Amino acid sequence: MVKNSSAAMPAKTAILASAKTVKTTVRTRATQRRTTRTRKQAEKPAIPVHIIPLGGLDEIGKNMTVFECGNDIFVVDCGLAFPDDDMLGIDLVIPDVTWLEKNSDRVRGIVLTHGHEDHIGGLPYVLRNINMPVYGSRLTLGILEGKLKEHGLLGKVELNVVEPGDKVQFGCMEVEFINVTHSIAGSLAIAIKTPSGVIVQTGDFKIDCTPILGDMIDLARFGELGKNGVLALLMDSTNAERPGYTMSERKVGESFDALFQRAQNKRIIIATFASNVHRVQQIVNAAACYGRHVAISGRSMVNVINIAIELGYLDVPEGLIVDLDLINRYPPEKMVIVTTGSQGEAMSALYRMAFSDHNKIEVGPNDFIIISANPIPGNEKTVSKMVNELLKLGAEVVYESLAEVHASGHACQEELKIMLGLTRPKFFIPVHGEQKHLRKNMNLALSMGMDKRNILITEIGQVIELTPNSCKVIGTVPSGRVLVDGFGVGDVGSIVLRDRKHLAQDGLIVVVATIDSVAGTVVSGPDIVSRGFVYVRESESLMDETRRVAKDVLEECAENGIKEWGTIKSHVKDALSKLLYERTKRSPMILPVIMEI
Amino acid sequence: MVKNSSAAMPAKTAILASAKTVKTTVRTRATQRRTTRTRKQAEKPAIPVHIIPLGGLDEIGKNMTVFECGNDIFVVDCGLAFPDDDMLGIDLVIPDVTWLEKNSDRVRGIVLTHGHEDHIGGLPYVLRNINMPVYGSRLTLGILEGKLKEHGLLGKVELNVVEPGDKVQFGCMEVEFINVTHSIAGSLAIAIKTPSGVIVQTGDFKIDCTPILGDMIDLARFGELGKNGVLALLMDSTNAERPGYTMSERKVGESFDALFQRAQNKRIIIATFASNVHRVQQIVNAAACYGRHVAISGRSMVNVINIAIELGYLDVPEGLIVDLDLINRYPPEKMVIVTTGSQGEAMSALYRMAFSDHNKIEVGPNDFIIISANPIPGNEKTVSKMVNELLKLGAEVVYESLAEVHASGHACQEELKIMLGLTRPKFFIPVHGEQKHLRKNMNLALSMGMDKRNILITEIGQVIELTPNSCKVIGTVPSGRVLVDGFGVGDVGSIVLRDRKHLAQDGLIVVVATIDSVAGTVVSGPDIVSRGFVYVRESESLMDETRRVAKDVLEECAENGIKEWGTIKSHVKDALSKLLYERTKRSPMILPVIMEI
């Protein structure tokens, strides 16, 4: 099955990929490549390697790992994370790259393992301040290009397409790309040749022996690396809690086949992840087989499918895809609509269909809907909500995991053990997962007889030093979460979030009064404005009481000669807090504003 | 196995439970019972029954069903629901009982099937306005008493303990209580004898043939009712998506046994639902067997265990339970701590232990923690967060469903079919579940050959009319969600919630100015206050710009002779919205306050 000849090529004969095999799609800056500069260091075997995870450890998302050796630095991935429930109003979260920015003169480039948001979504933000050459598969860079365009960075960043087997030199470190299977095409693992030894980072992977497109995961190359000696393995922990094997993507195609038969006289609507090109290919195949046309709904779905077709990752028969505006020209039972919304996202196409809010598609009893994805933890309730609405419209909805309409992209326990067994690393660092996933991954290695002292469960910001004989944490660098809100990157901090939480919980009361600065007397107000606390029209007596109490406090302050605004405000605040809590058992934010004339 | 002799008693010989067999635990009002008043109506076979679900259909929680026949009304359950993510600041949700309040003179009483929050949690709020006699098992009423105490209602409401086999007359309707198994002791189904026929409402149930305490579910009585003819069945749909059978609660005990052996030298901490008395019993049994003491952590856990011991639902060997303050007197390996927090609730005992915030228990590598519950949909992320923290403290944590440390309390597909097969209803109304659960329950009945026209999927507020030959919706009554926030019941409506959402998303800007009412000129301000929008100290130039733009607008208004406050405010709002969105891509709430002197 292994067709990639370079996988069998001895490491010694490797050519410098950056100079020869890497096809550069966009190269706008004529700056000299810095990657060959420190070649000589490779002869010194004693230089330790530093691995610095900046994201993805003890958390889900924003995967990012830094490798440092001597004077050279390169980065693997730069993802985003979605905000936690308590990050009110935040759009997304990216890694803190303070340390990398300080050392940007030594950064030789960034390697992207695949095109998922949690591996590339943070990159446009980081590239604003650290302009480094980017390496990835065609699809990965195709998706990245769309993002760079949105950020006004297209043409300003060097993008280098790599293929499995290619090698790129980052100073004293050489990165080899290895084909893996995952829920997005163009996924790569990397083997890093360093002066201290070879480090393998799997990226996200599963062992799919019957992939939809391209070769199966290059197990032989992992085995070869293992035979030659792997110093350390950094391995995906996402599915480490799940026993057995992950279902092959091809199995989903079989399920589609059965469901297309069942849905004979109905229109079929399938929601899945926009980036899952293999899944879309199988939908296309089923549609072609059953004589149906395909229309695409949802901005990200349209984008990715266009990129995938353009780059040859998706094979669509001529004329099969029709414009969403023209679907009414075809009988419903001859249509398949591929849509976003498999996670019940509020603005997604399927969600809008469910709430009869889609401008082109109206769901009814003649629709057969397949949700070809599992809810990501945290999305269960919104997916259920959407399914319930679709059912109420009379549609048939297939959504259970039992129907085998989704296959995970991550290796389960048996596959993880195979990867461990093939690479036989001296040191093992589980990555890409919460604490519980990392521990389960560790347990797998322990069950295979690995020494616990050779396994390192660590966290972001730790500096791991690897030598031929040791693996330990030797320090820390700044790390954490940078919150993105609108144009603001990092400007929403704990104080703003705390205020949003307070406002969300109980709303606010604004108390405004104008005071004569000389006499200290109230010349206007106090006026009370309430938002998110109580509905004023139904709470007039409470508002009157609030105004009265505020007035009393202000007058008392005047009588006692208190003129310091801060003191007056805190008196007002205290009195109103007490009053409102007693009356309502709520604690709205109280904002006293005192004007003076 | 069926020990309850009354189950075999023909319905004719039934005695009026309220007068004879019901043991009244609290009867503070000497008011004459109204339940015998309309006895004569029972002779008229033609009076249709109305079933009015006020909660629990097409939603999870706040279960409540009203039965009306002629001049008589009685209620089954009155639960609460937990707020959705978008109900910011809301404590809990109860059913809208407007219709019931309008008809309160005809309400003969309320029957509680069991003591879970989603079946009794709304009752104290409803009892404030509708004082009706309450019927339930000893444990159900024991738990309710605690709630009534908190609401100052204890002693003001008539509570009547019933046993399986007991019958209570509500005017022309007679309710018979039937023993069922569920995840709380003292659970009851009901059979309602009406002039039109017998209606069975299962309440929450599973078919547990090896219950921990008491008899197994009284399948024979359901079969007998079926043989005599059941007009309609209202059946729990919670687990209708799950194939097969629900695991017996006893199986959990076997798992505990194995885990207690494994945890030999460690302290054991087990989190479960406070109300799951059977689970606690099995923990107690395991502790006794392995020579460990039990301590209890978490207010609700202490409460329910005390009630259960007092009422004889929990059998604890003398001296086994020790005070939480005294746990350090015993070796850790001789202790089991039973705690709340199985859902990762932020204020719960286990959550506080995980974040090293518990004043009595410090978790470390010597702890073996069992989370004996599955996360309720929506709680997955918080449970994971808690597990991750516990792991970081070095504790061993057993939490997977694979470990069989939890058994559901609801019937799966095979059990539901058995209930359908036993009762053989003419009409079937799936209840207690979201749309998807109701549909799956319907599909089970269809698979057994039931006519689709005899199955009614309906929603809250619908009035279902049942006659011996028909089952249809004939109208609606007001229904919905009443939000409870602090002392406020129903005072937080859509406007307040919309404001909270807006504030949570982007915070607010208050613009205050004092204007000379005669000249129209600005005499003080505008001042800008920002909360939850940007951190002012880091955004001084934006704040300056905001102030400047606000000032310009106010001066323009003055120049143009615009004196109408509403107009001035909307000009300020528009200008600042535009400015702030352009600068930040955020849309804070803008509150212009204009004072005049």
Image (cartoon, coloured by chain):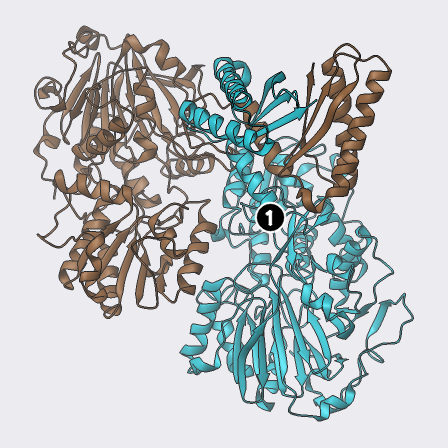
Chain colours: A brown, B cyan
Q: Is residue A346 above or below residue B252?
A: above
Residue B336 visible, this orientation: no
- At numbered mark 1, what does the secondary structure look like: helix, strand or loop? helix
Q: Residue at x 83, y 53 (%)?
A: B152
Return the x and y of residue B478 as percentages of the image width and height: 62, 65
Q: Residue at x 19, y 51 (%)?
A: A323
- Viewer-nearest residue: B172 or A180: B172
- Viewer-nearest residue: B548 or A353: B548
Residue B209 visible, this orientation: yes
Location of residue A255 by image quarter: bottom left
Report the residue marked by disc 1.
Answer: B260
Return the x and y of residue A80 as percentages of the image width and height: 37, 30
Q: Seen in the image, is A568 located left or right of residue B78?
A: right
Q: Is residue B273 above or below residue B63?
A: above
Q: Quadrant of the C terminus of chain B?
A: top right
Location of residue B119 by image quarter: bottom right
Return the x and y of residue A261 as percentages of the image width and height: 22, 68
Location of residue A460 by image quarter: top left
Amino acid tagged 1 = Phe
Q: Seen in the image, is B239 located left or right of residue A321?
A: right
Q: Residue at x 77, y 44 (%)?
A: B322
Return the x and y of residue B62 as percentages of the image width and height: 62, 60
Number of labels in the image equals 1
Q: Seen in the image, is A307 located left or right of residue B516?
A: left
What is the chain identity of the residue bearing mark 1? B
Q: Residue at x 23, y 58 (%)?
A: A336
Say few, some or many: other residues with alpha carbon within 10 Å of mark 1 (under 14 / 14 to 19 / 20 or more): many
Q: Is residue B321 above or below residue B267?
A: below
Q: Quadrant of the N terminus of chain B?
A: bottom right
